[in-house]
Amino acid sequence: MIINGLGTIIFSFLLGKKVGEDDRGNRYFVSKKKPIKKWVLYKNKVDPTNLPADWQMWLTNEQEIVPKDNSKKFHWQKDREPNLTGTSKAYHPAIKSPNSIEDKGKEHNNKIWSPH
C-alpha cells in the first residue's frame, strides 16, 4: 500500500497552503510561492481514482475556483468507488472451461453438414 511520503507531508506543511478538504479526508494544497502548483495529501492510500470529480478538475486546472460545497450531488449520482484492479476485490468474470459442470449434462450432437 502506497501512502504519502514523509517529504511530501513536510513540504506540504512548510511550503504549502491548505485550500480545502474533501468528504473522504483528502487535503488539497497550493504552493505559497507559486499558487499554480497544486497537490493533494491522501487520507489513506494514494489512489487518484478515488478523488471527487470537482477536486480532480481543480487539480488539473480545468476549473479555477476551489470546490467548497462537498455535499452538492444530484439524486441519481452514486458514490465514487476506488479502482480495485490488482486487489483481492477486483472483478474477475467467470471462466468456463469445456469440462465445467454446466456442460456435463448436455449432449453434443456434432454432425458434419452436407448440402444434400
Image (spheres, helix red, strand yellow):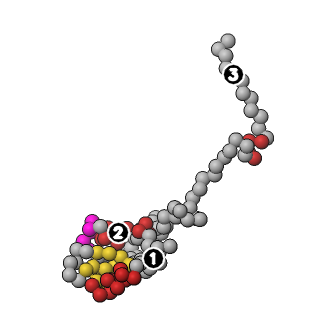
Front-most of residues 15 and 66: 15
Packing grade of label 1 (10 A; few <14, some 14-19, many >=20) is few
Q: Is residue 23 visible?
A: no
Tell me the number on the disc at residue 63. Answer: none
What element does badge 1 sit on? Answer: loop
Q: CA distance from mark 3 to mark 2?
A: 59 Å
Q: CA distance from mark 1 to mark 3?
A: 61 Å
Task: Please report the residue visible at 36 percent of the width from the left and 76 percent of the height from the top.
Answer: 40
How many marks the image carries: the answer is: 3
Q: What x and y, as percent, mark residue 75?
A: 45, 68
- Depth-wise, is mark 1 or mark 3 nearer the camera? 1
Segment colored magenta: 61-65
Q: Main secondary structure of the magenta part?
A: loop
> In the rendered image of this protein, does residue 51 appear above or below residue 104?
below
- Depth-wise, is mark 3 or mark 2 nearer the camera? 3
Task: Left or right? Give the position of 28 relative to 108.
Answer: left
Packing grade of label 3 (10 A; few <14, some 14-19, many >=20) is few
Q: What x and y, as percent, mark residue 107?
A: 77, 34
> In the rendered image of this protein, does residue 27 appear above or below residue 113?
below
Task: Please report the residue visible at 56 percent of the width from the left and 61 percent of the height from the top.
Answer: 90
Contact (CB < 8 A) between labels 3 and 2?
A: no
Task: Left or right? Give the position of 39 relative to 5.
Answer: left
- Location of mark 1 (residue): 3
- Location of mark 3 (residue): 112
Residue 96 colored in magenta in the image: no
Q: What x and y, as percent, mark residue 108?
A: 74, 32
Tell me the number on the disc at residue 56. Answer: 2
What element does badge 2 sit on? Answer: helix
